Image: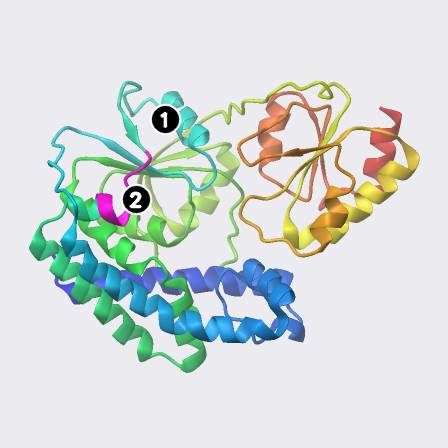
């Protein structure tokens, strides 16, 4: 077991990499001066929040900068008063973080030759109560001190950098518990479909049995300050993605798996178009639907991105919808359209016509759908 300062340094590095992701998002989507002052923390959400709250936005940010360290340090103290200690499970287990869907990870594990299909996958372990209940009192004290050291490290940074890191540290105490938990489960497998966010960084450095399941595209132009660790087994949707993962990780083994997307058939499936929306490209999506509905009548299903916060333009987008798809729903359809969603790979495997607003002109997509 390491000293508290070691854990805080690891988490600090993970948060630095989180900031790097947002700096890349800023360069791609918000390069102008309009949002220059916004913190590098979930930038898409920050833009939506700023547009919604207007003058109340900065008071909220200031309150958050004070509240986040206080909440995490308070949680570190209250963790000593756990309701009930759990008995430590000795047998080999699989712990999974599902950032997109549990079904993706479950299907990937079933397709893998390295994990026994009968192994129980624990999707619900990542909570403060659950993690703390499997740690000893001295380990919780180490976590408390590590949390305090983290905010000392953040406080030494330049002012704007400290703001970014503090906002990213919302779940910092839980992440420190996660590191301690992983070290106790050195014979167990940890799986995530997250490519390079904070828990992926931490897991890759603290376990020899890290399994990563691809769930979307990678951006190989992100400039990370801290190098990611080791992947024991990578499950990719196509071998063309392997070099992209190798840029960030040391990969021991890999295999290709089928996405095996489960599509639900509904009454309009045979003729419908499904638009998988992404907030940064909502203007292109609205323009596409406007042009399409001018030339043909077609049932339109809209699936909003579950991780994006939309502004008032969402109402315009949804006004075109015959049906709205919930986060957990994937409807069968005749045409699938997105800006460049990874979901298209699953739909292509089901022989659905797929179009990308990023790669094909809107007028060409409209014409193709009209004559089909």
Which circle marks residue 126 in the picture? 2
Is residue 165 part of the magenta span, yes or no?
A: no
Residue drawn at (33%, 36%), measured in percent from left and top?
96
Q: Is residue 129 magenta?
A: yes
> Which is nearer the eye, 134 or 277?
134
Which quadrant holds the N terminus?
Answer: bottom left
Q: Is residue 240 left or right of residue 353?
A: left
Between residues 239 and 325, which one lies in front from this camera angle? 325
Magenta segment: 123-130
What residue do we see at 36% from left, 63% from top?
A: 169
Judge whether 34 appears above or below 48 on screen: below
Q: Residues within 10 Å of mark 1 (few under 14, many from 20)?
A: many
Where is residue 150? Give x, y as percent.
26, 69
Residue in view at x 16 percent, y 40 percent:
186
Q: Main secondary structure of the magenta part?
A: loop
Residue 189, position as x, y percentages in the image:
25, 35
Q: Residue 278: horizontal and vertical position, in percent?
A: 64, 47
Instruction: Please give left or right for residue 33 compared with residue 146 in the image.
Output: right
Q: Residues within 10 Å of mark 2 (few under 14, many from 20)?
A: some
At a point 75% along the width and 26% down the height, the residue shown is: 272
The label number, if any, that marks residue 109 in the structure image: 1
Could you tell which of marks 2 and 1 lies nearer the N-terminus? 1
| SS for dot 1 | helix
Viewer-proximal residue among 302 and 33: 302
Q: Is residue 35 left or right of residue 227?
A: right
């Amino acid at each position: 077991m390491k000293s508290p300062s070691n854990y805080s340094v690891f988490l600090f590095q993970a948060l630095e990499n989180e900031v790097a992701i947002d700096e890349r998002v800023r360069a791609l989507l918000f390069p102008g001066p309009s949002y220059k002052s916004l913190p590098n923390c979930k930038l898409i959400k920050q833009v939506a929040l700023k547009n919604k709250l207007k003058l109340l936005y900065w008071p909220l940010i200031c309150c958050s900068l004070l509240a986040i360290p206080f909440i995490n340090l308070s949680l570190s103290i209250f963790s000593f008063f756990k309701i009930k200690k759990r008995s430590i499970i000795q047998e080999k287990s699989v712990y999974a973080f599902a950032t997109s869907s549990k079904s993706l990870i479950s299907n990937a594990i079933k397709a893998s030759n390295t994990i026994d299909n009968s192994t129980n996958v624990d999707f619900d372990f990542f909570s403060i109560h659950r993690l703390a209940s499997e740690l000893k009192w001295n380990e919780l004290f180490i976590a408390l001190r590590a949390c305090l050291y983290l905010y000392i490290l953040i406080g030494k940074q330049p002012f704007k950098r400290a703001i970014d890191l503090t906002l990213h540290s919302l779940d910092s105490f839980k992440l420190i518990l996660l590191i301690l938990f992983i070290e106790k489960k050195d014979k167990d497998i940890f799986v995530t479909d997250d490519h390079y966010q904070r828990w992926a960084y931490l897991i890759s450095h603290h376990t020899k049995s890290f399994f990563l399941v691809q769930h979307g595209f990678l951006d190989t132009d992100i400039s990370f300050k801290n190098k990611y660790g080791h992947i024991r087994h990578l499950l990719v949707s196509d071998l063309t993605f392997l070099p992209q993962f190798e840029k960030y990780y040391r990969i021991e083994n890999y295999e290709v798996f089928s996405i095996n997307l489960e599509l639900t058939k509904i009454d309009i499936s045979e003729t419908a178009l499904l638009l998988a929306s992404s907030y940064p490209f909502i203007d292109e999506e609205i323009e596409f639907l406007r042009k399409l509905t001018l030339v043909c009548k077609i049932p339109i299903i809209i699936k909003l991105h579950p991780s994006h916060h939309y502004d008032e333009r969402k109402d315009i987008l949804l006004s075109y919808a015959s049906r709205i798809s919930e986060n957990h729903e994937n409807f069968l359809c005749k045409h699938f359209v997105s800006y460049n969603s990874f979901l298209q790979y699953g739909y292509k495997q089901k022989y659905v016509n797929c179009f990308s607003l990023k790669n094909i002109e809107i007028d060409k997509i409209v014409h193709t759908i009209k004559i089909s």
